């Protein structure tokens, strides 16, 4: 549910509660004053403050629904939290007023006049409080509204307060006049407890108490591939408006694009794990070490990118010295001379040896980088050549379900084809690659005008 719609629903609930609270308050106060029942007057004051808290809630929820602005970049949700704190303060004020009235009653030794009207008003009030608190609590849970939950707890205290008052009225009717004061003081205790819960919860949010368990957040983040660790986790805010900051350690050789992709995945995992996340800030911290602890593919791509180059088909092999060597294809701008291209690639090799301490040597294959997108073609000869390539693949492996043939014109004037085939799902990626490479080699050998062949292997169930 959108925030604007949520606040409209919250306001409708509060308006209904407001009407109910004022009706109940007027009834209790009127009958309480008429019959000199301190407990009923105290309960009426309590209900009156319930109505006033609803007014505060209506105003604050409208203000809190405003979007972030220049002066409030995190939004206006703290207004709602402050309003909840104010509700708790009103409860404490109510409790103090009742204590003062109780002391005065003990001094005056006044006798209340209890009759059927007292019990009728209190019984109806009790029923209304039960319905209102249940409905408000349900909507608060459904909307994840801190304000509705706080106000529901406030209204729920009316149920216990009214029950206590009814018991006090029964005792007074039986001749125990002092029970009216006792009932009023019990009301004070219940109000104080409700106020304490609301105040402590609201204060915890205002002072930025931790909103999420840091260990659970770290566990979720560490499950994302490429993450080396988490060094700092900070969270704050109410349950439906949590702001989270997390420092994530990634290999130092990762490019900006790779880091951004991992940060996006981290946010997705966190939103799937925790509800109420409004904003997630992922701060990338480069790893402190490089070399054997850094994936060589990341280092090769990062160093190549720094020189304006691209690399692919990176393969590492172990040397006789127990170290390793790298073989890779390096894409150099097609308009470079061989000398200029060789100088760039030599620079890349030197950077790799400096970064990867266990690297013995590098073998590079220079090839032109594509300077434009492959173009679609409308040449019948090219289509026939593509069909011949499909026939060759089918002759080599007739049971591989060859499909999705495509041919494109490359920037160098040659052709590139792609086609799909099915392999058993249990075949390793390495074996699938060797299979595709074998078929591609056969097609290129038979059809020299085809410069590139891409074989997509997939399980039969994904066909």
Image: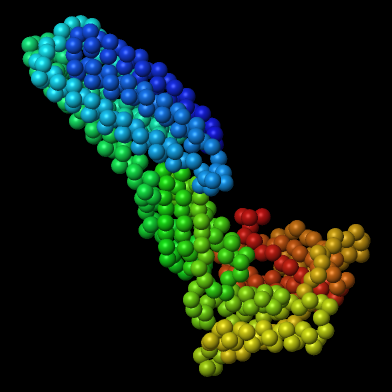
Horizontal side of residue 170 vs 92, given as left or right: left
Nearer to the camera, 234 or 371: 234
Give whichever of 333, 89 is nearer the camera.
89
Residue drawn at (55%, 43%), measured in percent from left and top?
Answer: 68
Where 57 falls versus 48 (above or below)? below
Q: Quadrant of the C terminus?
A: bottom right
Measuring 23% from the left and 28% from the top, which residue is drawn there?
A: 95
Of all residues shown, which one is farthest toward the left? 175
Q: Residue furthest right?
A: 380
In the displayed structure, 135 sits above or below 119; it is below
The image quarter containing residue 128 is top left
Task: Quadrant for residue 302, please give it.
Answer: bottom right
Residue 195 appears at what percent x and percent y? 28, 34
State left or right for residue 83 relative to residue 256: left
Residue 62 at what x, y percent from top left? 50, 31
Residue located farthest toward the bottom when viewing the structure as drawn: 321
Nearer to the camera, 27 or 377: 27
User: Could you tell me residue 23's position as x and y percent?
Assistant: 35, 14
What residue is drawn where x is 31% and y is 30%? 90
Is residue 314 something that shows in the picture? no
Q: Is residue 61 above or below residue 327?
A: above
Q: Is residue 112 at least partly visible in the picture?
A: yes
Q: Residue 441 placed where, x, y %?
A: 75, 76
> Which one is in front, 449 or 388?
449
Q: Is residue 40 left or right of residue 454?
A: left
């Amino acid at each position: 549910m959108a925030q604007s719609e949520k606040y409209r629903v919250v306001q409708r609930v509060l308006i209904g509660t407001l009407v109910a609270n004022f009706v109940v308050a007027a009834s209790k106060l009127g009958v309480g004053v008429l019959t000199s029942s301190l407990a009923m007057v105290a309960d009426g004051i309590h209900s009156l403050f319930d109505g006033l808290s609803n007014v505060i809630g209506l105003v604050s929820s409208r203000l809190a629904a405003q979007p972030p602005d220049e002066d409030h970049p995190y939004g206006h949700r703290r207004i709602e939290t402050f309003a909840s704190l104010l509700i708790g303060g009103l409860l404490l004020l109510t409790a103090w007023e009742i204590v003062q009235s109780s002391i005065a009653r003990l001094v005056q030794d006044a006798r209340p006049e209890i009759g059927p009207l007292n019990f009728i008003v209190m019984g109806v009030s009790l029923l209304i409080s039960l319905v209102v608190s249940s409905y408000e609590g349900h909507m608060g849970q459904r909307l994840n509204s801190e304000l509705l939950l706080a106000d529901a707890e406030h209204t729920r205290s009316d149920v216990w307060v009214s029950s206590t008052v009814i018991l006090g009225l029964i005792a007074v009717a039986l001749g125990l006049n002092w029970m009216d004061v006792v009932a009023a003081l019990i009301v004070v205790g219940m109000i104080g407890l409700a106020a304490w819960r609301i105040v402590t919860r609201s204060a915890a949010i205002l002072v930025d108490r931790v909103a999420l368990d840091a260990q659970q957040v770290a566990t979720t983040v560490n499950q994302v591939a490429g993450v080396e660790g988490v060094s700092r986790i900070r969270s704050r805010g109410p349950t439906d408006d949590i702001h989270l900051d997390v420092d994530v350690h990634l290999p130092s050789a990762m490019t900006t694009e790779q880091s951004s992709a991992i940060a996006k995945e981290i946010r997705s995992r966190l939103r799937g794990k925790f509800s109420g996340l409004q904003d997630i800030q992922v701060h990338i911290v480069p790893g402190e070490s490089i070399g054997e602890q850094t994936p060589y593919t990341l280092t090769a791509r990062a160093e190549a990118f720094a020189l304006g180059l691209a690399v692919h088909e990176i393969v590492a092999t172990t040397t006789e010295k127990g170290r390793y060597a790298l073989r890779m294809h390096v894409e150099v701008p097609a308009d470079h001379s061989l000398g200029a291209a060789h100088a760039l690639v030599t620079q890349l090799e030197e950077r790799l040896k400096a970064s990867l301490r266990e690297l013995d040597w590098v073998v590079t294959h220079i090839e032109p980088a594509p300077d434009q997108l492959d173009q679609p073609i409308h040449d019948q000869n090219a289509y026939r050549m593509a069909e011949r390539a499909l026939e060759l693949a089918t002759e080599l492996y007739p049971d591989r379900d060859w499909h999705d043939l495509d041919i494109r014109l490359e920037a160098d004037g040659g052709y590139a084809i792609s086609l799909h085939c099915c392999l058993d799902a249990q075949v390793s990626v390495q074996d699938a690659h060797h299979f595709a490479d074998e078929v591609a080699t056969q097609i290129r050998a038979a059809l020299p005008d085809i410069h590139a062949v891409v074989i997509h292997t997939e399980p039969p169930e994904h066909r």
